[in-house]
Image: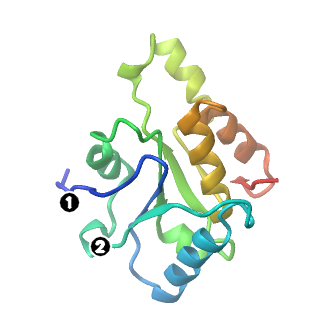
């Protein structure tokens, strides 16, 4: 596994988005615009910490998780990968930072990752996911279940 640059300067309230696909700059501009203009559909200011460094190109989920592991305030990281760039809705890959070691036991981990450790969310949904996980209002498994139930497999805020 390769070592990726350290992530610095992220405030605990910032949604962390890591760009891992560098094939379509226009799509990336669309993603970042959607993240900032849809911060709660105007209900609050969007706080996003974007990692846009080619050193992260083609980084795997495990490589990204390894790089962000030191951030104790981070419960979810969003990847802008190839699927994000190619799909019309630009769904980000939401990945939990929860590890098996942080859980009471294997059964607890299995329950908290019942629908996997990742799901897709439209950019406007990233703020909702990050905020609610940060304050413990909702769990990752709830968002993953909503994405699982969506016809396109996406979490979309209401």
Left or right: where 52 falls relative to 147:
left
- The foreground one among 25 and 148 is 25
- Residue 49 lies in quadrant: bottom left
> Can I make out residue 134 in this image?
yes
- The image shows residue 148, relative to residue 102, as above or below, that is below
Residue sitting at 34 percent across and 45 percent down? 65
The x and y percentages for residue 133 are 57, 37
The x and y percentages for residue 54 are 28, 75
- The image shows residue 11, relative to residue 107, as above or below, that is below
Q: Which mark is residue 122?
A: none
Work out whether mark 2 precedes mark 1 in sequence or the reverse, and give the earlier one: 1
C-beta proximity under 8 Å, tags 2 and 1:
yes
Residue sitting at 39 percent across and 29 percent down? 99
Q: Residue furthest bottom?
A: 26
Q: Residue furthest front?
A: 44
- The foreground one among 81 and 9 is 9
Q: Which mark is residue 5?
A: 1
Give the spatial CA distance, label 2 vs label 1. 9 Å
Residue sitting at 20 percent across and 50 percent down? 1
Residue sitting at 53 percent across and 38 percent down? 134
Q: Which residue is mark 2?
A: 53
> Can I make out residue 116 in this image?
no
Q: Describe the element under mark 2 as helix, strand or loop.
A: loop
The x and y percentages for residue 43 are 74, 60
Left or right: where 46 falls relative to 57:
right
Total numbered labels: 2
Label 2 Cα crowd, 10 Å radius (few <14 / some 14-19 / many 20+): few
Left or right: where 71 falls relative to 41:
left
């Amino acid at each position: 596994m390769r070592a990726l640059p350290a992530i610095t300067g992220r405030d605990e309230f910032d949604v962390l988005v890591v760009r891992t696909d560098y094939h379509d700059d226009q799509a990336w501009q669309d993603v970042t615009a959607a993240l900032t203009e849809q911060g709660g559909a105007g209900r609050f200011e969007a706080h996003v910490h974007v990692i846009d460094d080619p050193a992260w190109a083609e980084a795997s989920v495990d490589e990204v998780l390894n790089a962000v592991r030191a951030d104790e305030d981070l419960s979810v990281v969003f990847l802008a990968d190839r699927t994000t760039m190619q799909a019309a809705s630009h769904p980000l890959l939401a990945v939990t930072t929860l590890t098996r070691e942080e859980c009471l036991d294997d059964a607890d981990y299995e329950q908290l990752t019942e629908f996997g450790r990742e799901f897709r969310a439209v950019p406007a949904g990233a703020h909702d996911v990050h905020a609610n996980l940060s304050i413990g209002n909702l769990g990752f498994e709830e968002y993953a279940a909503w994405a699982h139930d969506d016809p396109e497999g996406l979490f979309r805020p209401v």
